[in-house]
Image (cartoon, helix red, strand yellow):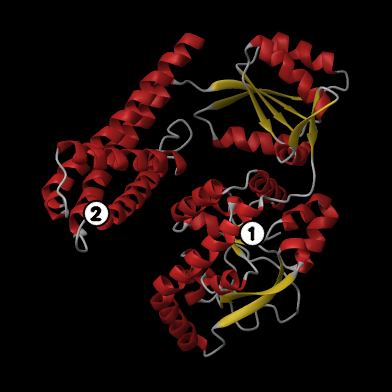
Amino acid sequence: MKNVNTVSRGILFFVKVLWIAVCTVIFLAIWMKFYENKLYEPFYKRGNYAVSLIYALIFWRLSKLYGCFDIDLKKPSEILYSTVISLTTSSFLIYIVTWLLVRELPPVLPLLGHIIICSFLALGWARAAVLLSNKLNKPKKVLLIYDNEQAKENGINIINKLTRKFILQNEKHVSEDISETLKYIKVTLPEAIMLCGLHSTPRNAILKFCATSGIPVYIRPNIGDYLIGDAREIQMANLPVKVYEKSEKDLAYLFLKRFFDIVLSIAGLIIASPIMLITAIAIKIYDGGPILYSQVRLTKNRKEFNIYKFRSMRIDAEADGKARLASVGDDRITPVGRIIRATRIDELPQILCILKGEMSIVGPRPERPELCKVYEREMPEFILRTEVKAGLTGYAQVYGKYNTDPYDKLQMDLMYIANQSLITDFKIILATIKIMFIPESTEGVKNQ
């Protein structure tokens, strides 16, 4: 089985490399035709190949970041969308590089042509890659082991959404006597195991058993796992010890993060000013009401501040004074509001909050104090989100949805807090581009 999996991975890796190579060769041809002679010091062959290598590296990294290579998890349409976004972002970045190398603003049309050509090729590549993955990788029969009904439901939802990867072989509540669960695993011999909601003691026992038996394990982590991820490793009395303390990042990182917040927010205001002006006019013309609305939100250390957004709902949307999230088909949202919410334009005024230092570009989304109190009654760990400054975008926004369960969003936010770095922030900023035009990511919560 291991040899078969190794061969499958090797074939699929070759397919991915081949796709990057095809797009890079097309880029090289366009570069040499339209850009080479515009350089102040024209490159020779090695220089052209160097620029193409830079493009290939950028395209490869963005393809991984945007999930273009998740061909065993996604539909061809999802792979195609991710690939087009990767092509567009890669071409934009290489255009900036080209601009730095030439004496004048380089022409845009050749790179637009590259995006169009490769996007058409991506139609066939996405479908062929998914079909090949389906042929090489048969779904694994998975045993779901859970601790409570909510965990069971979460596990079943994951398996049902990934029918190309998993088939639910059976489900079992973890036994108080872990030896019974281990015996059950020996008897059923699953191809994979999914653990949901298990405490550390039974989970560790199952992990040890599976490690020696060669059974892959998929784990839905608990809040404590993310806290441990942010812990420091030290040696005490010649023994390894993990120390968890309130998240305090390196001063150099905090300084650079603030510096980039200021630079990028100023650039964002300049670039987005025409869109913001058109949006303001459209809102005013529709109902004559205020263009912006503000709400009190919480940022680092539970400090309150006023967040600004373009108004997307009716003026009397919360006339009763009760705080509630937008729901699917919410009739409080205006026609203009539906457009600006779907395209994230309603969030642009928050750039002012970033400039003022109340928010950062990347961080957990700021919540209203009233909603925080509700969440904290159910999840005391929710307060941990306020250990860092609130953000315009974040891990939960990129990999979750508006209607993602608060507990799952909390896990994603804690994952970001545990792995903060400039590289992580940069990845999230780039990944935000991908989800800007996905309707599901702005869907309201379901009506209860």
Residue at horizontal 79%, vertical 56%?
Answer: 383
Residue 432 drawn at (x, y percent): 49, 54
For the residue pair 390 and 48, the one nearer the viewer reads as 48
Residue at horizontal 26%, vertical 33%?
Answer: 21
Q: CA distance from mark 1 to mark 2?
A: 48 Å
Residue 404 drawn at (x, y percent): 64, 52
Provide the secondary structure element on which disc 1 rests.
loop
Amino acid type at image mark 2: Leu
Of callouts 1 and 2, the N-terminal one = 2
Residue at the extreme bottom of the image, as rendered: 288
Position of residue 98 in the picture relative to residue 368 (left or right): left
Q: Nearer the viewer, mark 1 or mark 2?
A: 2
- Where residue 176 sits, quadrant-wise, is top right
Label 2: which residue?
A: 101
For the residue pair 443 and 351, the one nearer the viewer reads as 351
Position of residue 376 in the picture relative to residue 75 (left or right): right
Q: Quadrant of the C terminus?
A: bottom right
Residue 445: mark: 1
